[in-house]
Each structure stands twice: as C-alpha cells, then as structure tokens.
Amino acid sequence: MVEGDFFTDIPRDWPGNPWLEGRTLIRLPSAQERPTHMPRGPAKRTGPGFLNPAMAPARTRSVMLLTDALEHGWVGKSPIIRAIDVMSATGIRVRRWRNEIPGELQSKLQITANDMDDFALSWSVNSCKKHPAPINQFPISASEEGPVITSHHHDIDGIRFQKNDARIALFAGAWQWIDIDPFGSPINFIDSALQNLARTGVMEVTATDTAALTGSSPTSGKRRYGSTGITDEYQHDDAIRVLLATIATSAAKIDKAITPIIGMFDGHHVRVTVLVKTSKNKATQMRDKIGWRVRNENGVPYKFVVHPNQDEIERATGPMWTAPIWDAEIASRITKEKALELCYPNTQDIEMSKESGLTWTDEDIEYSRREIERTVRHIETCAPLFGAEHTLYDLDMMSKKIGKGSAPKIQTLVESLTKSGHLASQTPTHRPMIVTNASHEEFVKLFKQLIG
Ligand SMILES: C[S@@+](CC[C@H](N)C(=O)[O-])C[C@H]1O[C@@H](n2cnc3c(N)ncnc32)[C@H](O)[C@@H]1O
C-alpha cells in the first residue's frame, strides 16, 4: 500500500473474498485459503490482513460475554461502556460487536479499534464502508474520564479506528472493556491494560505462547510468567491458571482484584476473561488464591497447595491461580440457544451476503450453525463446576492408571456420576476430560463399575 491515510487508502488485494463469521460479512485477502467451518489450530499466515479462522469461536464468545455484561450490568454502573480492541487487525471483532450485539444495547457501547498497522486499519475501514452495520447511530466520542491521548483516528460505522501502539492507546484511560489479542505473549500489555481500566472493568486476554504457559518451553515459562510446568494431561488447565495468576499478581500491585469469568484453552491459544475491580482489601486477598498444583497425592490426581514442600517439588507446577476459574452464574448463560440467537446468520443475513458475492451452499450454512454450537459446547454444564471446587480427570490417563487399558465412554461416565448425585460434565478441551465434584473414591468406584 502506498503511504497515505488508512481512511482513504484502498489496500492491496482489496476487496478479496467475502466470508461470513457469525452474522458479520467480512473480507479475506484472496491469497488466503477459503476457511473450513471448524478450523483447529493456527492456519498458515499469508501476510498482513490475514484472518485466523481458528479464532472465530473466541470472537463469538467475546460477542456473547460483552452482550451478557450489558444485559446484566456486571461491568459497572457507567451509562456508557467504553470497549477497545487494542490490537484489532482487520477489525473483525469490533465489527462483530457492532453487528451482533442487539440493537437496544448498542447505545450503551462506545467502541474503539486500535492497531499499529496501516494495512490492517485500511482493510477494517474499507470493510465498514462496503458492509456497514445495519443501524449507524452509535455514540462515538472521546471520554471525559482520564487523560485523552490524541491518536490518528477516523470514525466509521459507530467505531473509532485509530493508529497507535497498544500501550499508548490504552493510556487514554478508563476503559470498561479491554481486549488484548497479540501475536504471541500478552505479557507486554497486561500492566498498561490494568492501569487504564475503569474502577470496574473487564480484560479479555489471548495468549498464543502456549509452550511457555504449559511448561513445554520451560525457560520462557520461567522468564515470562515465573512458572514451572509439567507437560501432561493437566498442562492446558495449568496454562489457564498461570495466565490468571500473572494478571492477578499485577492487578494486586495496583490495588485491583480479579474475578475470572471464563478461561479456556482452545487449540493453539489460551484466552481468559476477568472482571477487575479496584479494592485494596480484595487485592490483598489475591495472594490466597495463588499456589501450586501437586500431582499424584496418594493416588488422587492432584491437589492445590500454597507452596510445595521438599517431597512435592518434583511433582508441582505453578505458581498459578488455585481458586475457581469461571464465574458460575455468567458462564451458565453462555448457552447454545444464546449463541444461535446472537451469532447465527438469519435468512436476511445470508441473502444480503450472497448479494455481496458470498458463495455459500446450504451445507456451508449448516456447518456454520454447527460451528456456533461447538463454540459453546459443554460451557453451560461445566459452569457450576469450574465456578467452584472440582477435579479434572483425563479418561486416557485414567484408563492407564486404574482401567487396565480401558475406560468407559465419556458420556456414560458423566451420566453415572450425575445419577449418583454429583455434578459432572465433559469439558470443552480437545482431550477426553471430565470435570466433577465427586470424591476421588467415588469417581474410581464408578469408573471401575462401568468397565466391569
Ligand atoms: C492476532 S492480531 C489481532 C486479531 C484481532 N484482535 C481479531 O480478533 O481479529 C494481532 C494484531 O496486533 C497488532 N499489533 C502488534 N503489536 C502491536 C502494538 N504494540 N500496538 C498495536 N498493535 C499491535 C498487529 O498489527 C496485528 O494486527
């Protein structure tokens, strides 16, 4: 792209190919392969403007959580919620917030998209011009709160697009909703985000440096997160908890406390959503929620401790968040029905998209429905468990440990645990995992009964 202004420039390769993510028509650079509907893991990057289709589920959940916060008022009392995607790339997330969050909530929402990259910003702006949101009457104005940093910006389609380094963009201050989604580690941006949240605010943080968080890259794990890992069936849960502890520790230093809303390991990335409140007392209590996981304690898969003793150190991972990793009430509203209601394209969306060149068959439409459903699968049933004390069991590992090589079907075991009066659910991870509040003895008894 010739050096100019991202608002007026036409980026190289524009308009690319149309694609529908959620209910929002987006444009993919033509060098990028047609996405599949259920992508796993990182796709091959094809230069600036590349859109990672594997992040579509995370963006859908982001639409759902922001909608839930606006509907249920858990993000503070401010009449206007200032939301920023500080690394907005080609603007899919912010455009989805504008398109898919119901119209009656939109007047409460002031949206900013920031990126450093001219190409990405220009692609975003041209996408808005070509496919405007259905109603174009949203508040866009710099806030009175906090210091206002002047960024090179343009307002279109109810979204402020601006060019700045993320940390400077954040410094404009008093955000109620901050999304951090870099390539790689979010560590460079966590402090700035915490410092520039309103007294009550939400941070959504994506980390793709999973090797550091899980312990499979021990030196970067130690350096970046101060953590030690073990690469086994608990590494993904560890990664969520290490990221939460990192945010909680930084928050506590500036008198803020976090409450995890939801945290997931999804293929190639970890993503957590946390509510952050300014409170000296609660910030002091943060350290009681950080500890270590010690594996294989007298046959029990693991326990959480404040600090491992000499005998436990070889089996311990952490420091990590040891309190609940989800908010049971909020997560229980992230249901299949709500996902379809908010994010599944209706006939009009499909027709309008086809008029703009989308070549979707009935099969594509059906696959997109399944993808939306998969995006929230098991969240509702896991909510009361991840929102309280629970134990995670990996059936492959349990078959080796107690099943002499065999394990019951995951659904049969869930039913058996439920019939016996416990809470149990399959988890959203890609491993065959069950979360339950049954005691270990009870779990082993039922497991053995089922394999006969
Ligand atoms: C993974 S993409 C973001 C994807 C986007 N949030 C979404 O949901 O589609 C990362 C983006 O971060 C931008 N970026 C990297 N470092 C940055 C910084 N320090 N300040 C602002 N943007 C940055 C890159 O230009 C790139 O567009």
Image (cartoon, rainbow, N blue to C red):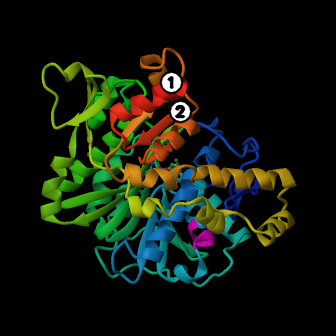
* Residue position for label 2: 432
Which of pointers 2 and 1 lies earlier in the amino acid sequence? 1
Image point 53% across, 29% down: which residue? 450
Cα gap from disc 2 to disc 1, whole angstroms: 7 Å
* Residue position for label 1: 396
- Secondary structure at badge 2 equals loop
List x then y, in percent, for residue 171. 32, 64
Image point 58% across, 39% down: which residue? 411
Which quarter of the picture shows residue 76? Answer: bottom left
Q: Is residue 151 magenta?
A: no
Question: Is residue 211 visible to the viewer in this orientation of the structure?
Answer: no
Is residue 404 rendered to the left or right of residue 172? right
Looking at the picture, tell me which residue is in the foreground, 411 or 2.
411
Is residue 139 rendered to the left or right of residue 341? left
Asked if the residue under mark 1 is in contact with the one under mark 2, i.e. CB atoms within 8 Å, the reply is: yes
Image: magenta residue range: 97-101
